[in-house]
Amino acid sequence: GPTFVYTPAVNFNGQDSFTYVANDGSGNSNTATVSISIAAVDDPPVADGGVRNLNEDTPLNFTLTGSDPENATLTFSVVTQPTNGTLTGTAPNLTYTPNANFNGTDSLTFRVNDGGQDSAIATITFSVAAVNDPPVANSLNVTTAEDTAASITLTGTDPDNNTLTFAVLSQPANGTLTGSGANLTYTPNANFNGSDSFTYRVNDGTVNSAAATVSITVTVENDAPSVVTKSVTVVEDTATAFTLEGSDPEASALTFTIVSQPNSGTVSGTAPNLTYTPAANFNGTTTLTYRASDGQLNSPLGTITFSVTAVNDPPVANAVTRTTNEDTPVSVTLSGTDVENSTLSFTVLTQPANGTLSGTAPNLTYTPAANFNGTDTFTYRVSDGSANSNTATVSLTITAVNDAPSFTLAGNPPASNPGAGLQTVANFATNISRGAANESSQTLTFNVTQLSNSGITFTTPPTINATTGALTYAVAANSSGTARFGVTLSDNGSGTSPNVNTSAQQTFEITVGLSTLSGSVFIDSDNDGVRDTGEIGLPNVTITLQGTSTGNTTIQRTTTTANDGTYQFADLPPGTYSVTETHPTMFLDGVERVGTAGGTAGSDQITGIVLSGNTNAQNYNFTERGLTASAVGLKMFLCSTPSGDVLIHQLLPAPAGNGNALRAASSAATNARGTSNAVVSAASVEPLVRAAIQQFADAGASAEQLARLSSAQVSIADLPGDQVGEAGGNAITLDANAAGLGWFIDATPTVDEEFVDAAGRLQATAGGDASGRMDALTAIAHEFGHLLGFEHSAGDEDSLMFEWLQLGQRKRVTPESLDDLFANEQTWDW
C-alpha cells in the first residue's frame, strides 16, 4: 500500500531517500523520490570495565577508558573506592596501591560522561597476587643479677603468619646460651656484671628476617635493704612527726612505701618524713607497716607502733531552756557529756538575777523572785575531776501570772467591852499589796467571813478597809464571848488558773472580855494544896497550858515558875483549858489544887478549866511533899544566890576518890612574888567558886553535875610540897598560900581583864596583880573537874585538867574543853 515506516540505521542522522512508482493496474507511473532528514540525537557513552593484575605491596598505574557514539569528549568519575587499597592520580590516569601485605581481589566502580549523559557504571577489578613478606626478629632487653641465669624467649612476627624458626647469629661475649629455638637461657660468666649481647634472626620458611639484638644487662648482685621497727609516743589529739628509717649495704638511695595504714588515725607527709595524727580522742596503741626499696629489692616489712597516751578531754556542759509561771518553782536538770565517760560534777558559776536556786547540782530548783516575770539566766560548768567544761547557760522564761493580793493581820484585836460602841482598830491589816508592779492599778476588796461565834452579837459586823487596813465593828450590850473570822483579799484581775485573784485566808478572833489563869508550885508541908506562909516555892518548874477558844482556835503556851514558885497565863480568850506540871525530880508528888474557875485535878495536871470573858482564875496549884526515896539520907539545904534565886544544894556521894592534886610548875618558884593580893579565906574564894560553877554551866555541864558542884565543900589548909589544890570525897582544898607562891584572888572572876591572850593562852598582864601568882579561879575549876570524875590529862598543857599550873596562867572551862573532859569521864553512880 502507500503507507510505509522508515527506520533509520542505529545512530544514523542526516539525509536519506528512496524512490517509488505507482501502478494503476495497467501501468507504472513515473519514478518519484522520497527525501528523509534524520535529526541527530545524543547517545550515552560507554565506560569500559576490566581486570587489572598486580602483585602484593606493588602500586599499579592504569587508565580508565570509555567510548561515545558521537565521539564526544568524555570525563571520568570514580563512584566507589576500593576497600583494600587506595587510589591516587586524576581520572582517567590513576594509581591503585594495595594495603600493606594485602592479596586477593579488590575493585572500584566508575562512569563516563559525554557532556550530556552519564554512562552505565563499570567495574575495574584488581587481582592482587600474593608475594611472601620477610619476617621480623624483635630486639630484646634482658636484665639479670650477677651470677644469676636469665630465661630469654626470642620473638618475631610474620605478615603472612607463617611458622617461624629462630637462629642465633652471634654468641654473647660474656656468657653462654643454652636451650633451643626461641627458648634460651643466658648464664653470665662467673662474677661478670655489665653489658652483653647476641644476635639472631627468624625465617618464615622462605625468607630470613633482618638480624635482631638481645641486649643483656648483668647487674651487680644486690642485697635487700632493711628497715627499723620502733615505737613512737604520741599525746592524744596531738599530731606527731616521725621518720621511717632504713639502710642498704650498697648505700643505695632508698624509697619507702607504707604497706598498711594504722587502724586509728591518719598518716600524712612524704616518706620517709611523715606525721601521724591520731583519731579524735583516741588513746592506746596502733601500728603501720612499711618497707624500703633500693630500686631493685624490697626490705622485709617493718612496724611502727604508735603509743597514744591518754589526755583528759574537757567535758561539755549543755545549754538548758526551761519555762515556768510567775511565782512557780521549776526543776532544772543540768547536763553534760564527757568523752571519757567520767563522773561529772556541776558548779553554778553565776546565780540568776531574778530568782534563787536550791538543791544539789545537777538537780536544781529555780524559784523566781516574787512576782517576777520575763527572762532570767544562770551559768554553770561541769568538771570531770581534772578539767572544766565550757560555760553553759540555763535560759529561763517566766510567764506573767496574776498574783493574789497579800496582806498581814496584826493578830487578834484587843478585847473589847460589851456595848462599847463602834470599835476601830487602825492598821489591823498591813502590808496590803496588789502584787507585782504591773498589777498596781487593780481594785482590792477585803472579804470578812464569820467562821464561829460563842455568843457575841454584832451591831456592826466586822469590815476591813482595803485602803487603810482599819478594822471596824460594834458589839451589843450584855454580849460576851469569842467570834472567829476568816479574811481574804481579792483583786479584780483574772482568777483563771494559773492566775489567782484572791489571797489565802487568814483568821482573827474578836474577844469580848479576856481572862487570866495563875497558880504556884511549892513544897506543901501539910499536903492540902493551899500555899501557907513559910511554904517554899519551887523555881524553874515548867508549866504547860493547852486549850481551845470558843472561836475554835487552838491555844498552847509554856512558862516556868518564878523564883517564888508562882506562874501566870494572861490574855486568854474564852474557852476550855488545861494546865500541866513537868514534875521536878527527886520530889514526891503532892496534891493538885483546882482553882477558882473550876476543873478536874489529875496527876500533875488540871483539866476542864472553863474561862468566860473577864475571868481571873487563881490558885491552880501543884504541890510537892518532900524527897523521893532515892534522895532520903542525903543532906539537903536551901540557900539564896546573890541574885536572890533559891538553889537546892545536895551533898552527893563522891566517886571513888582519886585525891588528884594540882601542883605548881617546877619553874614557878623562881618567878614567884610570894604573897597573895587578898586575904585567902572561905569568904574570899566564894565568888570564885560561883564563877567556876558558872563556867561549867556555860560550857554545857548537866544539871546533875552542876548540883554536885553546888554541894561541894571548899576548905583552905596547908598542903604538902608543891600542891596548890586537892580534891577528895565531896570537897576541894586550896593551899593557904599556893605552895608559898601566892594566890591571885580575882575580884571580878567573870571577866579576864588581868590577862591577855598570848598565842591562844590567857597569860597575866606583865606587872599586874595576877602576874607572878597562881590563879585561884583556875585551881578551883581544876579541882571541880576531879569532883566530876575527870582525871589528869597527860601531855596537854592547855587542858584544864593538866597536872601542873604555871604562874600567871588562867584556864577556863569552854564547851571544847568540857568535851575533852567528858571524853575522859569515869562512869559512876550518883
Image (cartoon, rainbow, N blue to C red):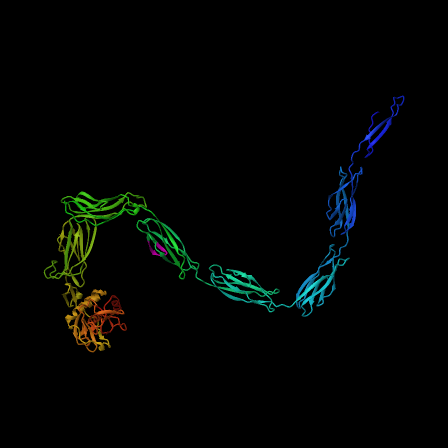
Q: Where is residue 375 in the image (x, y as percent from the top left)?
A: 35, 50
**Residue 123 visible within the image:** yes
Using the rendered view, name the quadrant where residue 177 is placed: bottom right
Direction right: furthest residue: 27
Q: Where is residue 635 in the image (x, y as percent from the top left)?
A: 15, 68
Q: In which quarter of the image is the C terminus?
A: bottom left
Q: Is the magenta stretch mostly helix, strand or loop?
A: strand
Front residue of 663 and 67: 67
Using the rendered view, name the quadrant where residue 159 is placed: bottom right
Using the rendered view, name the quadrant where residue 382 is placed: bottom left
Magenta residue span: 356-364
Q: Where is residue 414 in the image (x, y as percent from the top left)?
A: 17, 49
Left or right relative to 139: residue 3: right
At x 68%, y 69%, the residue is 192
Q: Is residue 358 magenta?
A: yes
Left or right relative to 94: residue 716: left
Left or right relative to 171: residue 580: left
